[in-house]
Amino acid sequence: MLTYKYKDKGTVIHRLSPWSKLGWMASLVLPALFCNHPVYLLLLFLSTIPVVLVAKLSKEWAALMKFSLFLCMLIIVVNALVSQQGSHVLLQAPFSAPVIGNPRITLEGLGWGLGNSLRLLVIISAFTLLIFAIHPDDLMLALAKLKLPYKSLLVSSLSAKFVPILVEDVKLIADVQRSRGLELDKGGRLRKARGYMAIGIPLLSNSLERAAGLAEAMESRGFGSGKRTLYKELKLTQLEVLALIASLLPGGFGLTLHFLGFGGYQYYPVLQQVGFTGKEVILLLLWLLLLNSMLLVALRRARP
Amino acid sequence: MIKIQNLSFRYSGTQKPALRGINLEVGDGEFVLLTGPSGGGKSTLCRCLNGLVPHFYGGEISGKVEVEGLDVLTSSTRQLATRVGMVFQDPENQTVATDVEREIAFGLENLAFPQELMARRIEEALDSVGIAHLRCQPVNELSGGERQKVAIAAVLALHPSILVLDEPTSELDPRGAEEILNLVKRLNDELGLTILLVEHRLDRVVQHVDRVIVLKDGEILSDGSPREVLSELAQGEIGLPPIVRLARGLKARGITFADTPLTVREGRACLSEVLQERKLSPPRPPRYNLEPRSSPKLGAPLIEVKKLHFAYEGEVTVLEDINLQIFEGEFVALMGRNGSGKTTLVKHFNGLLKPTRGEVIVDGLNTRETSVATLARKVGYVFQDPNVHLLAESVEEEIAFTLKNLGFKGEERQRQIEEVLERFDLTRYRSQYPRSLSGGEKQRVAIASILAARPKIVILDEPTRGMDYKIKSELMEFLDEYRRDGRAVILVTQDVELAAEHADRVILLNEGRIVAEGNKREVLSGALLFSPQINRLAQSLRNQGFPQDILTADEVLGLL
């Protein structure tokens, strides 16, 4: 079973400062949001793979991708059914239904679905690092350095930690109430709602009690009593600064490309021809290099 | 040094004071055990020492609390944190950071220690608790015992001179509990820390402590050396260790000892002396050939487990080749370490889990083909933690919830509610909000809500953890009576003394297999890990003709 938890695998990616990893994610996600061109998106997607491999996260990544593919299917199917704008009809339904009218599936509709699925894959693929390669406490330190208030960060981090506990609580409480004869899948809406209340109420009360217990424990260790220091501070070595710059460059470059008019793509009414000028190919190759530059910097770190 | 003068406290929103006129002085380096019935004010007293009462919990306070010369009422938690370290009951609710090292650092950070000093303090704390090897481990992947050690290390890093532990072992298995108590003892010995420990199970700690204080209804009922307190207090106020009960039983027959024995070792010496001086003769014949105490006639099998294998989807096997029958009229104890598969096994009895292979037949129904709701009429299941159980606005509605689900209607339902309220001494709480009751009372409401439907089989998963002696023995008496007319009680427990006293049959699980099963005398006597105090005593008196399968103090008294 996949648990959505950070595990230190000791790779060069894990040892990289959280800022570089956050920067790298931003560098992928922002251009992915702006660019429509499937080749651009593919380029972004492919450039996440070496980083994932070096971080030894292929299993976790595969599990996320499996889940995302399901979402992609949904996007493709719904869009194909709903969007009526394309001009190459592949399939025409012999009936007409309210709201969606007389559905037809067009080549362009499918293309749009595929293109946007790719965008989703880029974003989720980039988030693999956030979930599995940034120590949650380091993430907190990194954000604190960006002048976000420590207390709010701690609260978010603690709430995130409560999620797996909540999930377990739900399972346990459902078991308890079923053992008391509660049937969750029977009866009308009202009865079902009442059934879920039987799980919701103990869940909520328990969480409140947990929170109060934690607050008490924190208070008795002097939390919030005044000035505070940090045990581990994130220090930016020369290499880290280099990695941070390397992580931000492809984002800047990608956005520049976008604002210079590159990376646009028309799906409707007819799929635009894919063709690149020599200049654009060179720019894309340069971008590909930049996208991998953080990894190249990280790999220069001497083995311990 | 702790000085408490005439301390009273009432939580805001309650009528009854939690503490009344407490006067107490605890010297440096003393090891004090704080015990007494639940709801007696132990936790409140602990929280008065580091200022959680009244700074965190509001209320009305009077009197004076002084810790290391600081007045708690006027001092800040920051000042108090370096004097009093506090460890709580639930290890899950007291960790803040993700890994061990940072968890220990948390308190130091809060008090603005410089980094080099922090590093040194963390090193010391890790070493003094013996968890240096866990330094980089994520806290939530540790066992309960290890997490409690982390919690102790985290407060030790602040160099307190007083360590307060509020039931630190109640969420742990016996092995984890013993490790924590030994650690506390060592800290007291080697570092000279003053210790204030809250604990229900006296047999675990009484030999380590200098002083026992019993709190009841917010007042000090008794205060003195363990021997004094244990020989003067009535059984029922606190749960006396079996050895002490034996000594007091002998005393009632005119055989007194200079010192009340507290440990198996002392008990052995005393009893051996008694036998040698022929004040009492060993029983003849020496073989204690006893059937389970007044065992009722066993009826038809209620539960049949045949070749049960179980694994959670895609994971390793949890239960392997379990074959087992449970009969009408039986009281069965299911024992084993944490993670041995006890809970997984009993979840098969009401269909919450279905066998991967093999089958489970409950009162003629195959669980594979029967819904949990249908089985719930036959099998009542009380889970360990009453907090996951309680959902209603009042105790009465809580009980009605189960009955409604199971299709009880009108007058019959009301009659059953009244009966069970009466039986569990809950009538006076009937319209109260169940979650506002004390721990033991909540557990009673949970049990009552299950037993109201009078199921043929009742399963209780560790119902007595953290329960005080009185509530525990009342519950056991009730269960003993309950199983008599053709019902069965299955008790999942790690409490050997409890099983020795109340069960007929013991099933011992290890790593998902049944490793021992049979009459409690066969299973519990002579075992190294799972044998009760009195049996360990008897084993060492073999040469004096003492029966080897004796389990409880009452049995010894009955024989001599």
Image (cartoon, rainbow, N blue to C red):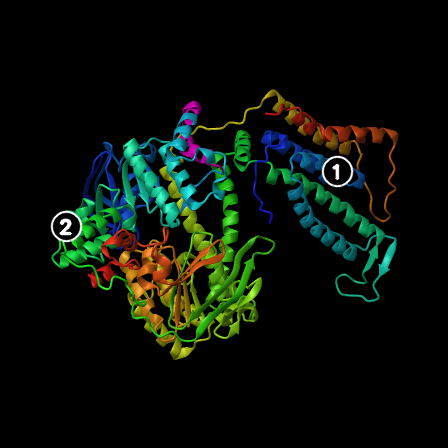
Point out residue A161 in the picture as x, y percentages from the top left corner.
Answer: 51, 44
Which is more toward the observer, A136 or A116? A136
Does the magenta stretch mainly form a helix, a strand or a loop?
helix
Numbered disc 2: what chain?
A: B
Please name whichever residue, B485 or B500, is drawn nearer the observer in this view of the structure.
Answer: B500
Q: Is residue B281 left or right of residue A160?
A: left
Q: Which residues are magenta?
A: B99-118
Quarter of the image containing the C terminus of chain A?
top right
Left or right: residue A297 compared with residue B66: right
At label 2, the amino acid type is Phe
Residue sitting at 30 percent across and 32 percent down? B190
Q: In the structure shown, which secondary structural element does the residue marked by tag 1 occupy? A: helix
Q: Are marks 2 and 1 in contact (CB under 8 Å)?
A: no
Looking at the rendered structure, the secondary structure element under dot 2 is loop
Instruction: Judge left or right: residue B298 versus residue A29.
Output: left
Residue at image location 21% in from the left, 56% down from the top:
B246
Left or right: A91, with B484 as reference point? right
Percent x, y of residue B164: 30, 40
Q: Chain of mark 1?
A: A
Amino acid bearing label 1: Leu
In magenta segment, residue B107:
yes
Residue B241 in view in this figure: no
Most extreme residue toward the bottom is: B411
Residue A280: image x %, image y %?
A: 84, 31
Mark linked to residue A46: 1
What numbered label is drawn on residue B257?
A: 2
| C-alpha span from label 2 to label 1 | 83 Å
Q: Position of residue A234 (x, y in %)?
A: 54, 27
